[in-house]
Amino acid sequence: MTVAIKEDTEAAVRWLRTPEAIRERCHALLALAGQGRLKHFALHLERLESAADYVAEVIRSNYPDLDIPYHARWRHFAAGGVDRWAALAADLGELDADAIARIRFDLCVPSVLLDAGAGPDWMFEEPGTHLSIGRSEGLAVASLHAFRAGAFSADPERPLRADASGLERVSASDIAACFQVEPTNPLVGVEGRANLMRALGAALRSRPDLFGDDEPRIGSLYDALKGKTVDGELPARTILAAVIAGFGPIWPSRIALGNENLGDVWRHSGIVADDATNGLVPFHKLSQWLSYSLVEIFEDAGIPVTGLDDLTGLPEYRNGGLFLDLGVLELRDPKLAETALPVDHEAVVEWRALTLALLDRIADPVRARLGKSAAEMPLARVLEGGTWAAGRKIAREKREGGGPPLQVLSDGTVF
């Protein structure tokens, strides 16, 4: 019996880490919303068409030629029209494509993991350009400057690395310095971000198969995944599986099955199952956004990535705010918008799940308005063009400062 229970638990953990599990659970909550059976949100699907109109207009405005890049960290590195990655790459000399890809992994992973919501009052004043940049773009630019200065490398002679020894020594004061944190420039979750970097260093040591056993570094994951190509192509779900397996242990302990920390997985009473997954709703938001960001590295290195739409949309406050602000979703109790909610609150779980499921529902109407197929405009482009940009635009139209319509307490590792 003990063996059977253990095997069932292991199977449950494996399933909860798949895109299929994410979609199944989120669409289950969307179905409950359609039946009027969710406690915190009412669903108005009849407004989805006008939301698709709004998103399509934003895409045409941002990308008149409809040449839309992926929703990835690389867009944020170009905040303010300054292509910072290109400037860094220009200094790399005659490195081959694989060496450049390893450096991009070393830059991208910490940057994405440090991206959880900054809060509305934080800004990064960029040296040189003197641009003042907030939110995700500011976090990206600050993390790139930190990377370039060797913040994640243990070897001063090789600053453009993120290795186990370098990451394990990152302190809260290091994060505060890199991100220019002051009493007048507060950043949400400084300690949580530092803890995440140290946990990342430990995770590299625990998986020599992914990160190498001699000076483990994030960039070695590029080689591990390159070795999993099939006929020269790499399935997107293979990237996500490696990201979750390699970086899963870094997340703060929340919900666990057996000895496995589930990460970005939360409870909702509307989800009923007769196994260990009962009540559980997985999202893996940062892991999926990281996967989208890594896809770009592989394709630039000449390795096509297949099955991109196996991954899901991202349940974060820009996409979620889009559906709230356009009336596709409505809070049953408007007072919930007056206070910051903990991330495990059922209203937040509902909001994130409905957002993810509605991104699936809005993608085809948006494509139809633009005359594009799913192959021409995968979800990663719909997000970038797209729902994320439209969520930011409508937020600015509705609220001074452009904050989200619902506030979520962050420890620096979610959203």
Image (cartoon, rainbow, N blue to C red):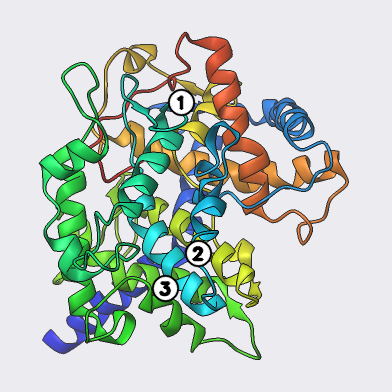
Q: Give the Cα separation between the discs numbered 3 and 1.
A: 37 Å
Q: Nearer the viewer, mark 2 or mark 1?
A: 1
| Figure quadrant of residue 165 | bottom left
Q: Amino acid at mark 1?
A: Leu
Q: Is 277 on the left-hand or right-hand side of 107? A: left
Q: Secondary structure at mark 2?
A: helix
Q: Earlier in the sequence, mark 3 or mark 1?
A: 1
Q: Amino acid at mark 2?
A: Leu
Q: Position of residue 340 (x, y in %)?
A: 27, 22
Q: Is 292 on the left-hand or right-hand side of 167? A: right
Q: Nearer the viewer, mark 2 or mark 3?
A: 2
Residues packed near mark 3 inside 10 Å, few (<14), some (14 to 19) or many (20 plus): some
Residues packed near mark 2 inside 10 Å, few (<14), some (14 to 19) or many (20 plus): many
Q: Earlier in the sequence, mark 2 or mark 1?
A: 1
Residue at 31% over, 29% down: 408
Q: Which residue is mark 2?
A: 294
Q: Which residue is mark 1?
A: 131
